[in-house]
Amino acid sequence: MNEAENETTMGAVMTAYEDKMHDVPASSAGAPGAADLPAATEEAGADAAHVEAVLVDDNTPCVLLVDDEPGVLSALRRLLRPTGYRVFTAESGAAALELLASVEVDVVVSDMRMPNMNGAEFLAAVKALYPETVRILLTGYSELDSAVHAINEGGVYHYLNKPWDDQELLLTLRNAVEQRALQREAMRLTELTRQQNEALREFNTELEVQVHARTEEIRQTVLFLEDAQHDLKNNFATMVQVCANMIELRCGAVAGQSTRVADLARQIALALGMSGLQAQDVFYAGLLHGIGKLALPDEVLRKSLDRLSPEELQLFYQHPLRAQMVLTPVTQLAHVAQIIRQQYERYNGRGVPDGLIGEDIVMGARVLALARDFEGLCSGGIVKDPVTPQKAAAMIRSQAGLRYDPLVVERFFSVLEERAKQEGGDPLEQIKSAQLREGMRLADDLRTGRGVLLMTKESVVNAHQIEQIRRFEAQEDKPFTIVVHRFA
């Protein structure tokens, strides 16, 4: 032991009596946890551990003092008493490690020169076992090499020379305690962040499951609504065709005439670049273009246009106005009603009922007028004797710019050419009702011998419909004409 250490030790011995008056041994102080701490034994001798708990608050910083000289420990305890720290002492490295196993310590202050286990070895063990504990070394000037070794091996936070300066030691301890507090707060925040991240991850996982379930529910709902809307549209279109069929029955028209007008009008509309919705309105207008005829007398309905008297013609040309009035309550058919009203307007302005000219006539009405007249020429509705499609087309061409829009006429002939190309492309087959099989697709409307529409073109038949068709056919005088797409 050097001269400085002797001086410190003598000072510690001189104050030993005073320490005994103020300090109470750990075994009898009643401090929390004192019964669990290592006690001094005869075998341990100088390695006995003494503990003093200055305060009992769990948040109070804990300092462990390690020195093989009791006088030094007493001096340090007395110095630290005003700080309010909980102070533990041990007289050897082994006793200190035993104490550290049962008590969480914030700062360890260790002497360098101790028997059996010096300060460098002890602090290295503390670093390995309790790396969060801040480590301070007390050493003499002659032990600089040992201090460097302790700093390197034991990760010493700071080292102080013996004899120490009280203010420097207190300041160093305060900084060490603050560093330990910052470490604990950082650890607490890190753990809190980890827990919050884990909770957030679980929440996100649960949210993803809920979002996925909700998205799937919405998707199913959308599919259901789309199917319902599709069925509604199909049912609406079928009801319009049923109405067209009733018009034909009442007016004595050739079965399927309205459907042929509607199909041709829709094809021309699409060839003109009209949208699908616009072409659909034109199709409905073709099906219902004669609905106003239901109010006409039979003698007018039974004649072709070329055989009507002037009075009968005037009465006949009022049917588009009646059609518009009949369709007014149906919001979806508002534009269809306008097309039907203007179907007898002429491109040169000499039509009825409003005398509209050229572009003032809605495009759908210009298309419907041509499709209606072409079918009327072929079926005998305009002239007494039907004409061939070729002659009817020539008559249509001759009226371009007069009755009909020249652009519509041009697109009409494009549609005829396309039809001619497709006639040989899709194999069709005419079969008997006994040959009908579930899944067959109709290539044309299925009607009774009297023209009553049973199923529309492109419908796929099922078992129930096949049974109905056969039952209806049994009540007719002749078998149905059934045309289907041939299976590949």
Image (spheres, helix red, strand yellow):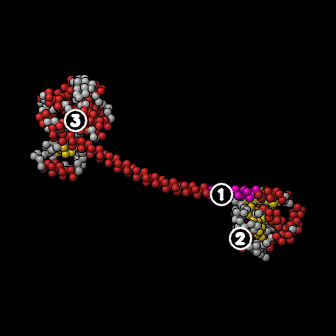
What x and y, as percent, mark residue 420?
A: 22, 33
Residue sticking out furthest to the bottom: 42
Would you call the spot at circle 3 few (<14 residues within 10 Å), some (14-19), or many (20 or more)? some
Res. 374 visible in picture: no
What x and y, as percent, mark residue 78?
A: 82, 65
CA separation in Å, label 1 and label 3: 87 Å
Q: Which mark is residue 322?
A: 3
Q: Earlier in the sequence, mark 2 or mark 1?
A: 2
Q: Are marks 2 and 3 in contact (CB under 8 Å)?
A: no
Q: Are marks 2 and 1 in contact (CB under 8 Å)?
A: no
Q: Is residue 411 above or below residue 113?
A: above
Name the residue located 48 percent from the left edge and 53 percent from the top edge. Answer: 208
The part of the image, by quadrant, that contains residue 355 is: top left
For marks 2 and 1, give the one nearer the viewer: 2
Q: Which mark is residue 32?
A: 2
What x and y, as percent, mark residue 480?
A: 14, 45
Regarding mark 3 in the picture, which secondary structure is present there?
helix
Q: Is residue 448 above or below residue 205?
A: above
| Residue with the mark numbered 1 | 187
Q: Is residue 177 magenta?
A: yes
Q: Earlier in the sequence, mark 2 or mark 3?
A: 2
- Which residues are the magenta region? 175-191
